[in-house]
Structures are given as structure tokens and as C-alpha cells.
């Protein structure tokens, strides 16, 4: 009899244990897993000296941070653009900035139908040419169709104009160029990166945005009011964020802060 009662008690204990064994893992699995530690090169760590600042103080702090970079020669830009602007659907191609066309990496040069190296901050605006520094900074150099690059020339950015043949969604007139909607924000963030990175140090002009077109060879680029609108209209996408990572990890080892922290555009301008 006592053995029978002991067996029943043991059975109850085993059943309770079994219930606990089911219940405990269920509650553990429902809890969020701890997040992995951020890498040392994360944006949070990178921008630590700029946190909490606004206006001129933020601009100065970001200049100090992003001025620490590796510089490329102009010839090295060809291969670099093959990596930074690689077509996610075809690793043998790049995506051209203004036309959006996917084109073989090997088809670059100066002939019609080729792609070449577009200075989004026009190199005549501050007269830096293709010298190592602003002339070779990947954060504003993009592959573009040779003909479209020529049409854009050194024009400032603004809305309006006539349609650009061969580049749907782009417009131009005598003194301005409007890129297609999908890259309007990219253009704005490249211009504003240049304005923060090049502050009259390194032997180059102090590059600044202004709210006009027709800046010619002056170290200014416009129009800031339109660029801010484009920045809001077209936030950073996966292609642009990946490009920022490739430039940081593989080439210049600096970042475009307005891709990582879009709110800083309004905090400065």
C-alpha cells in the first residue's frame, strides 16, 4: 500500500516537473534576445564628439571627425566607383547617378555611351579640379553617363528646366540642373557633406552652400533651400547607406554624417 501511494506521489511530482519543463522555456523564448554589441566602427561611436551639439558647433565637430580620412588619387577613383556604386542585381555593373542605367564597370572613359566620374560638387566651384582631396573624394564622386555629365556641367542644383534626353526625370536650364526624384536626396547630402568636410583647411577653398544659382567658380553651391527640400523628400535608402559603408570600410575610412543622421541637416542649416 505504501509503495502504491509512493508511486502515485512520484507520478504527480513527475507530471508537475514536466509542466514546468514546458512552461519555463516558453516564457524564456518569449523574452527578447539580448542585442549584439555594436562594432567599434559603428556610427554611434564614430559621432560621439558631435552628440548634443547644434549649429556651428555641430558643423565644427563633424569637420574634425570626417577630416580623418585616407585620400585616393584620381586614377584610383575608377575602381573605387565600381565598388561603391555596384548594381546590387549585377556585380559586373554600376548604377549611373542621373540616368539610373545599369552599365558594365569596364565601359568607362570619355566616349559617348561610356560612364565617367561626375563631381556632384562641381569641381570649378572652388577651383579644386581633380586634385587629391575634394577632387577625389568618393563621397561626392559618382558614375554618370558621359553625355549627361556634360549637360550638367558645373550648374547649381534647382527645380525646373527642360527634360534631359536619355535621362528620364532630369531637367536642366541655363544655370541649374534637377536630378531624378530617386537621387535628389543623395545629391543634397553629397553637397552638404562637402560643405562640412572642406572648411578652408588642407590648402583648399572653404566650400559652402548658398541659396542662389550661377555661382560659377566661387566656392559655393546652391540652392540650399531646394537641397534641404530634396533631403526631406528623398531620405537615405539602402543603396546610399551601403555606399557610405563601402567608402568607410574599404577606401576613405570616413563617413557622410547626413546619411547616418539625417536630422543634422536641419540642426546646422
Image (tube, rainbow, N blue to C red):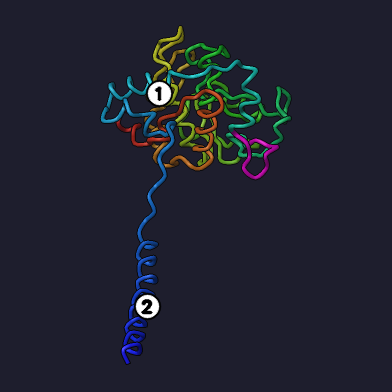
SS majority, magenta: strand
Point 45% across, 26% down: residue: 191
Q: Is residue 205 left or right of residue 266?
A: right
- The answer to which of marks 1 and 2 sits earlier in the sequence is 2
Residue interval drawn in magenta: 85-94
Task: Give the quarter of the figure containing the C terminus.
Answer: top left
* Disc 1: which residue: 212
What secondary structure is found at the residue carrying circle 2? helix
Residue located 47% across and 28% down the image: 190
Front residue of 254/18: it is: 18
Q: Which residue is mark 2?
A: 14
Q: Residues within 10 Å of mark 1 (few under 14, many from 20)?
A: some
In the displayed structure, 263 sits above or below 207; it is below
In reply to whether residue 92 is colored magenta, the answer given is yes
Depth check: 222 or 61 in front? 61
Q: Is residue 147 visible?
A: yes
Q: CA distance from mark 1 to mark 2?
A: 81 Å
Q: Is residue 256 magenta?
A: no
Which element carries disc 1, helix, strand or loop? loop
What label sits on residue 109 in the rendered view? none
Percent position of residue 20, x then y:
35, 71
Amino acid at each position: 500500500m505504501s509503495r502504491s501511494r509512493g508511486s502515485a506521489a512520484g507520478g504527480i511530482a513527475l507530471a508537475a516537473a514536466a509542466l514546468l519543463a514546458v512552461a519555463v522555456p516558453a516564457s524564456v523564448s518569449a523574452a527578447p534576445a539580448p542585442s549584439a554589441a555594436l562594432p567599434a566602427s559603428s556610427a554611434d561611436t564614430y559621432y560621439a564628439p558631435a552628440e548634443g551639439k547644434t549649429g556651428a558647433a555641430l558643423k565644427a565637430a563633424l569637420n574634425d571627425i570626417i577630416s580623418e580620412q585616407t585620400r585616393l588619387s584620381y586614377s584610383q577613383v575608377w575602381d573605387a566607383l565600381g565598388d561603391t556604386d555596384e548594381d546590387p542585381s549585377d556585380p559586373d555593373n554600376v548604377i549611373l547617378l542621373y540616368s539610373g542605367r545599369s552599365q558594365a564597370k569596364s565601359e568607362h572613359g570619355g566616349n559617348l555611351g561610356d560612364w565617367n566620374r561626375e563631381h556632384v560638387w562641381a569641381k570649378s566651384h572652388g577651383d579644386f579640379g581633380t586634385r587629391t582631396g575634394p577632387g577625389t573624394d568618393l563621397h561626392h564622386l559618382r558614375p554618370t553617363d558621359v553625355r549627361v555629365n556634360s549637360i550638367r556641367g558645373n550648374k547649381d542644383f534647382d527645380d525646373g528646366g527642360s527634360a534631359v534626353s536619355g535621362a528620364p526625370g532630369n531637367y536642366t536650364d541655363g544655370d541649374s540642373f534637377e536630378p531624378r526624384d530617386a537621387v535628389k536626396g543623395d545629391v543634397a547630402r553629397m553637397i552638404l557633406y562637402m560643405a562640412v568636410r572642406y572648411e578652408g583647411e588642407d590648402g583648399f577653398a572653404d566650400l559652402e552652400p548658398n541659396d542662389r544659382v550661377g555661382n560659377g567658380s566661387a566656392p559655393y553651391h546652391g540652392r540650399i533651400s531646394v537641397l534641404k527640400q530634396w533631403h526631406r523628400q528623398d531620405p537615405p535608402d539602402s543603396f546610399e547607406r551601403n555606399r557610405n559603408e563601402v567608402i568607410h570600410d574599404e577606401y576613405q575610412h570616413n563617413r557622410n554624417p547626413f546619411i547616418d543622421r539625417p536630422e543634422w541637416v536641419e540642426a546646422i542649416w
